[in-house]
Structures are given as structure tokens and as C-alpha cells.
Image (spheres, rainbow, N blue to C red):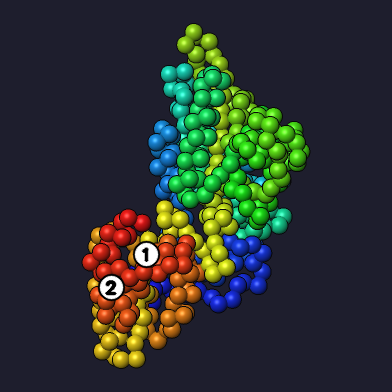
Amino acid sequence: MRYSQLFTKTSKSAPHDAESINARLLEQAGFVRQEMAGVYSWLPLGLRVLRKVENIIREEMNALGAQEILMPALQPKENWLQTGRWDSVDVLFKVPSQTKKEYALGPSAEEIVTPLVQQFVKSYKDLPTSVYQIHWKYRDELRAKSGVMRGREFEMKDLYSFHTAQEDLDAFYVKVTETYLRVYTRCGVDAKVVQASGGVFSEKFSHEFHVETPAGEDRLLMCSSCTFAQNIEVATVKEGDPCSQCGGKIRLTKGVEVGNIYDCGKKYSDAFNFDVSFEDGTQGRVLTGCYGIGVTRLVGAIVEASHDDRGMIWPKSVAPFHVHLISLGSKDAEVAKCVQSAAQELYESLSANGVEVLWDEREGVSAGEKFADADLIGVPLRLVVSEKTLKEDSVELKMRTGQEMRLVKIQDVEREINNF
């Protein structure tokens, strides 16, 4: 994409009400725009990141054997009354209709997916099965904060599994845990598995996935030597205690929750009388598990975990572009024309070979301004074509994570990118 074609623009100043790093940088770089508290428009650069995170999640969910569906966000009140959550979920948006009926804007989809699957699953032969969606959710947060990490409208991947036996649910639960950790690794963040309570979604235990960062809303107790971790709200240890697993020291830290998984047992199948025929001819109640990843929240967590004082530093796997190409002007009009022509040729060549390139071809913009924009946007690799580099038949290459700049022959650029 040519930079001049982006209808969005970067800003030299941070939004006055941005309380978190992700809110400041995502808005300042033109990735999102806050429409009101907790509600954002996702702009071209931000949407490219969001779609890449979605695709990583989708690939891993499909590899797990789950089937993708899409359920309504507008949900019938009757289902919520049936599970007893109409009045117990304090963040539930309740929408009155001119028909005098009320509806829920779904913060999750247990009330939809359980009777939906029930319509098709009648026998033990139909189980286990699992379905997921990537969809927008709504929660009536009293105070939306932390940028895209705590919103009133947000995107979530929610997965639901159905089983006849606890052993089968337990085994799938472990597979989901491993899959989630793979998702986060592919997205460029180090997530920790944290023990937590079930809350309003489950009557049993649950686990959360946290990215450790000072911007985190949750206080966590983690072992300094092993993987033991607990949310402080359900903790059986305190800071400074020896770890029960390895004897290491327990430390207090903060984290951003980017996912959670619940063994829901019979909570939702009881509500809808979801039984199937077992192999011995008897009827038995289905067991369920619920597994969520906050997609938009994960984008915010990546920014919180990967930035510096100049801007964002995107992992290659989710960066809006692989390469930020910059062509610099010259006082000599003929030289400037040659620079622009060489940059265009490189841009077209890389694009034709599948390299995602953002080309800053703007004229009349200083090198300093272009470099500042590149740092703010945070694409992993920067290439510069200038009067100086053309004398060497080269381009200047710099990684966003480093300070070193080096000249690379134009014919070797694609190989360098592929090795990155």
C-alpha cells in the first residue's frame, strides 16, 4: 500500500484521554479511533493486525478439530432466564424493543450454543463435538478503560465443547490449554497459565491466560522458578511464600488477561435439559467446556508488551505490513525522480512476490517525519531508498527492534527479507 493512499494519518500528540500505552499508540498511529468510551472503529492498519490475529486463532481452532459457526449477538431473554443469568450478570446489556420484548446483547454465547447443539446432538455417537466463533461481544462495563483491553464492545473467539464423560472433557481441556499457548506464541507474546475461580461462567475451576505487564489490571502470584501462577483473588499462597510445586519464591506481579477456559460441568446442560442416549441405552446429561480468547484485547496486550518510547514494535506474524519502505527526496529534481523510480520498482517487485509493503512515497515530507512515522507504526523491517543508497546500488535496511542500519544491494533485498 502507498502511504499517501491511507485516509488515516498519524498524530504527533497522544489523545488527551489515553490512560494506557495501547490506547495512546494505537490511536496516535491511526490504527483505531475511539467513538465513545469502550467502543472503537478499527482503521485500515489496525484491521490488518486484527485479521492476522484472527487467522492465527482460526488456524489453531481448526487444527484442534473445532468447527466454526456464527451465532447472533442479539439473544432472546428467555434463554438467559432459563440459565438464571438474566439478573446475575451485572454487565449484561438488556435491550428493550418497541414490541415490548427485551433482548440481551451477548457478552458470551452459552445461552445460544447449548440449545443450538442440542438440536443436532442426540446420541453418544454424536459426541464429543466442539464449535467456535469469532464475533463481537458486549458488556455494560461501568468504566471502560485500558484502551482496547477493556471495552464495552470487543471481539472474542469463543469455543464450546460437549462430552459424555469427564475424562474426555479433561483431555480436551488440556489440548485447548496447549493450543492457546501456541496461539499466543505465534502472536509474539509470552502468556502464562493462571489458576482462577469459575466466576459467573462456571461452577467449577477455571484457568486464565495472562501476558505479564505493568499495565495489567489483574494482580498475579507467580513462582520465580516454575510455571505455578494464581490470580490473587483465588490465591492459596502469598508473596514471598515458597512454591508448593518447586520450592521457588512466590512473587507478586501484574498481568493482562487474554484468554480463559472453564469446565462448566452440567451448568448449562442442566438449564436446557440437554441429555443424550448413552451406549448402554440410558439417558445421560452432557458435560460442557467454554474457552475464550479476547481478540481485540490480545492486540492491546501485544502493544503493551512490545513497544518503546518511539512507538509500537509489531511481531512479524501480526504486523500490518512486513516492510516499511521509505523513499527520500533530494534537492536535485532528477535525482529525486531516480530515487522515486527505484523505490517504485522495488515496491512492485516485493509486492508481486508476496511481501506486504507499506511504501511512504510522500513528497515534501522530511526524512525525520517519515522515520518518526515508521517507528510509531512499528512495522518490523524498514527499507530506505535515497540519493546516498542509490550511489551504492543499495537500500538501507534497519530492523525496528535494533539500532543498526546497513546497506544491502537491491538485488539481495528479497533474500534478506525472507531470512528475517
Q: Secondary structure at mark 1?
A: strand
Q: Are marks 1 and 2 in contact (CB under 8 Å)?
A: no
- Disc 1 from disc 2: Cα separation: 16 Å
Residue drawn where x is 47% and y is 41% of the image: 182
Upstream in sequence: badge 1 or badge 2: 1
Q: In this orientation, does residue 18 appear?
A: yes
Residue positioned 34% across, 87% down in the render: 330
Q: Which mark is residue 240?
A: none
Above or below, comparing residue 23 to residue 318 in the picture:
below
Query: Which residue sits at x=62%, y=72%?
Result: 15
Q: Quadrant of the C terminus?
A: bottom left
Query: Which SS class for mark 2?
Result: strand
Total numbered labels placed on residues in the image: 2
Left or right side of 420 for 225? right
Q: Where in the figure is residue 107, as x and y percent of width and height? A: 60, 46
In this image, 347 relative to 132: left or right? Answer: left
Label 2 is placed on what type of residue?
Ser
Q: Which residue is mark 2?
A: 394
Q: Residue furthest bottom?
A: 332
The quadrant in which residue 236 appears is: top right
| Residue with the mark numbered 1 | 323
Residue 368, above or below 101: below
Which of the two discs, 1 and 2, sits closer to the camera? 2
> For the residue marked with disc 1, what is the amino acid?
Val
Residue at 53% across, 29% down: 173
Q: For mark 1, does the 10 Å Cα neighbourhood hold few (<14), some (14 to 19), or many (20 or more) residues? A: many
The image quarter containing residue 415 is: bottom left
Q: Position of residue 214 (x, y in %)?
A: 66, 55
Query: Quick one: which residue is furthest to the top in this view?
Result: 280
